[in-house]
Amino acid sequence: MKKFTMTVLSAMLCGLVVLSACGGGAASGSSGNSDSPLGVVPAIYVEVAAKHKALNEELRGERDLDLYQKKLKEFDEYKAKSYQNALKEGDKIVGRDVPCSGDMYPDFQVTGAKVEKFDQGKDAGTVIVRVMVTPKRDIVVRESRRNCAEGEYSLKDTSLYYVLMKADDHLIELGQLNPFNKNAYNSSLKAEYAPGQMIQAGVPCNSEGSPVYINCHTRDYTEFAKIVFLREEDYNALRKQAYGF
């Protein structure tokens, strides 16, 4: 299996977007690529984080309370304008295809992935990607793994394993999804099939797809390029390499 390099947001802040920490206006995502799957949305969050880091360092030596509060207010205004830009840019990426691999499972085929929407919260920005999966053969589904006979699959317990990666195969984040579940992997099951039903080959496991949540406020996704699906054993080996467990 290839070796991948973990990329985290904090590791990028020391040398990235230095100019964004030295002025007003708003983060524009200029360090990103508007044609990439996530557009410049991730770059906006990286630029805000870089400015915040620089501000914290600057404020450590600030003894003038009025100036201290003024700088905080200016940053809050900058951040608000930056997040407005993120919302506008988030609208532009809805419906974009996200490159992905998905032909390593004996009974499942990942047929595609698209950006569903961009959600913005307080100091948070998440791109939701929907991944479509179909069975390669007719399969019967059961409620849980203990109810499954050989060749059957659990609506609750089935997992596909993936990594979010740069174009050069540097790893950004690891994750899992349940192809039958409209909700997130660790959320309550929202399936379209009932235990005992058969899903025919080529028919989606869930017609809306399963979500992958890309949290732009926790890691640097500026160079995100693709979703790579892995077998469980390769996923576990990569997780151990990246996290030590």
Image (cartoon, rainbow, N blue to C red):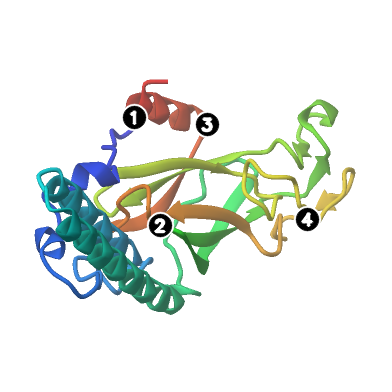
Which residue type carries mark 3? Glu
Residue beneath label 3, please?
232
Separation (CA) of disc 3 from disc 4? 24 Å
Q: Residue at x 60, y 40 (%)?
A: 106
Query: Relative to residue 210, is residue 17 drawn left or right?
Result: left
Indicate the quadrant where residue 142 lies.
top right
Q: Residue 123's mark?
A: 2
Q: Position of residue 14 (x, y in %)?
A: 13, 46
Distance (Cα) linking label 1 and label 4 = 37 Å
Q: Amino acid at mark 1?
A: Ala
Residue 93 x/y as whole percent = 43, 74
- Tell me how many marks there are: 4
Mark 1 and mark 4 lie on one chain; the one further toward the N terminus is 4
The residues bearing labels 3 and 1 have C-alpha atoms spaced at a distance of: 15 Å
Q: Are marks 2 and 4 in contact (CB under 8 Å)?
A: no
What label does residue 242 carry, if any? 1
| Separation (CA) of disc 2 from disc 4 | 43 Å
Please state the horizontal and vertical placement of residue 105, each as a whole percent of the image.
Answer: 57, 41
Indicate which disc residue 200 carries: 4
Q: Earlier in the sequence, mark 2 or mark 4?
A: 2
